Image (cartoon, rainbow, N blue to C red):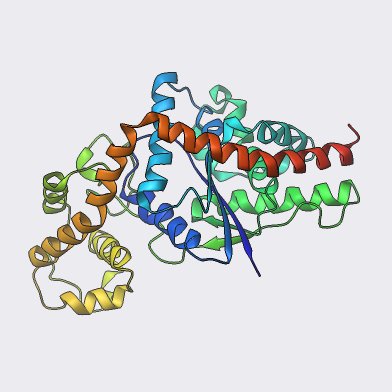
């Protein structure tokens, strides 16, 4: 059966290796399977749940689209667009927010984490973010959604919202209940400076991450300085349980090589960490440098990127406008 896949990436700028291995690499693989119909959205409406510099946001939207294309997603066979260009997303989010329950949203752990102790100062948009995410998915009758562990709870909410809408308006199977596509390995890439912290662009140290725009010398330096431990290279997977930095670096290498952890461990068993780091650097440069070059090239052609997003939004709008029209009819508008 043909899978309809929807996923989105926030245009936060400065995308890094964690974004690539945790999501975008998987998107590329899914888009290259001929039985899949893929929609990839630059979720700029989600981005404004926290204050953005308007000029930087525009650049980040283009950079995210450029990263999709540079990584290998073909805009001719998959839809690439930015969310704000398709008004059905905002309309659908409001209708679904009138179906959703406050109790469901109160259970969302990501809001608690992002809002911190002073929830009173958080925006309503940050609180209702998961309802907009549900609208994004349900407008395209997506059958499958690639999610990491941090978004799993939001997809469960999306499924609950779809089922409640269908029950409330006596419309069996009208909103398709999507299935998660969970990347079992290497979905969470950790900091190069602390194997217990997720790789993040908000980390004050640039040495904590590999940016997708990093050049050869920068990558070499970052891997050379990446934190390890005084023990020798592990001999089996069980040795990694108490060695987060070693596990992270081996996970990065394994994901880039599309092989299992055991295979990577066997490859470097009995060797020095310095030899492993050298091979890891070579692999990173081989995989990331072409993406970095292409991103920079695409960012120099803003008209081309804007045209890709415009063409994608027209394709997305054809699908979403039909669905929102049917939703309005069911509601009674």
**Location of residue 279 with respect to 141 vertically, above or below:** below
Relative to the observer, which residue lies in front, 81 or 43?
A: 81
Q: Is residue 73 left or right of residue 333?
A: left
Which quadrant is the C terminus positioned in? Answer: top right
Residue 149 location, x and y as percent?
50, 56
Of residues 329 and 100, the one nearer the viewer is 329
Q: Quadrant of residue 243?
A: bottom left
| Residue drawn at the location 55% of the way across and 62% of the way down | 181
Residue 329: which quarter of the image? top right
Q: Is residue 327 left or right of residue 263?
A: right
Counting from the top left corner in percent of width and height, residue 330 is at: 88, 41
Q: In this view, does 94 lie above or below 138?
A: above
Q: Which residue is drawn at 23% across and 75% down?
A: 265
Whether 288 is drawn above or below 87: the answer is: below
Residue 61 pos. (x, y %): 44, 33
Residue 17, horizontal then vertical, whole percent: 31, 50
Horizontal arrangement in the rendering, residue 176 relative to residue 51 (left or right):
right
Is residue 330 visible in the rendered structure shown here?
yes
Q: Residue at x 62, y 63 (%)?
A: 3
Could you say which quadrant of the image residue 135 lies in?
A: top right
Q: Quadrant of the N terminus?
A: bottom right
Look at the image and tell me whether residue 211 can be seen: no
Return the residue found at the far top.
Answer: 54
Left or right of residue 97, residue 57 in this image: left
């Amino acid at each position: 059966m043909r899978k309809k896949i929807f996923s989105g990436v926030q245009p936060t700028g400065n995308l890094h290796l964690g974004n690539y291995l945790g999501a975008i690499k998987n998107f590329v693989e899914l888009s290259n399977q001929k039985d899949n119909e893929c929609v990839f959205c630059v979720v700029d409406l989600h981005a404004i749940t926290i204050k953005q510099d308007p000029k930087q946001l525009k650049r980040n939207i283009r950079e995210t689209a450029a990263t999709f294309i540079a990584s290998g997603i073909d805009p001719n066979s998959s839809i690439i667009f930015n969310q704000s260009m398709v008004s059905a997303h905002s309309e659908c989010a409001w209708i679904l927010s009138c179906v959703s329950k406050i109790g469901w949203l109160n259970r969302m752990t990501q809001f608690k984490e992002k809002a911190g102790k002073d929830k009173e100062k958080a925006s309503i948009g940050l609180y209702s973010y998961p309802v907009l995410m549900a609208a994004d998915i349900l407008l395209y009758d997506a059958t499958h959604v690639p999610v990491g562990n941090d978004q799993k709870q939001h997809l469960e909410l999306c499924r609950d919202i779809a089922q409640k809408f269908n029950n409330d308006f006596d419309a069996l199977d009208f909103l398709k209940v999507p299935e998660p596509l969970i990347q079992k390995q290497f979905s969470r890439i950790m900091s190069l400076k602390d194997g217990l912290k997720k790789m993040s662009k908000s980390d004050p140290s640039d040495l904590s991450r590999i940016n997708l725009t990093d050049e050869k010398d920068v990558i070499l330096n970052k891997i050379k300085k990446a934190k390890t431990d005084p023990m020798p290279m592990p001999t089996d997977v069980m040795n990694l349980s108490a060695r987060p930095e070693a596990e992270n670096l081996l996970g990065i290498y394994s994901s880039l090589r599309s092989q299992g952890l055991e295979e990577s461990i066997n490859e470097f068993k009995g060797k020095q960490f310095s030899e492993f780091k050298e091979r890891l650097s070579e692999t990173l440069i081989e995989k990331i440098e072409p993406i970095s070059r292409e991103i920079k090239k695409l960012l120099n052609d803003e008209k081309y990127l804007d045209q890709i997003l415009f063409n994608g939004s027209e394709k997305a709008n054809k699908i979403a406008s039909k669905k929102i029209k049917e939703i309005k009819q069911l509601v009674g508008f």
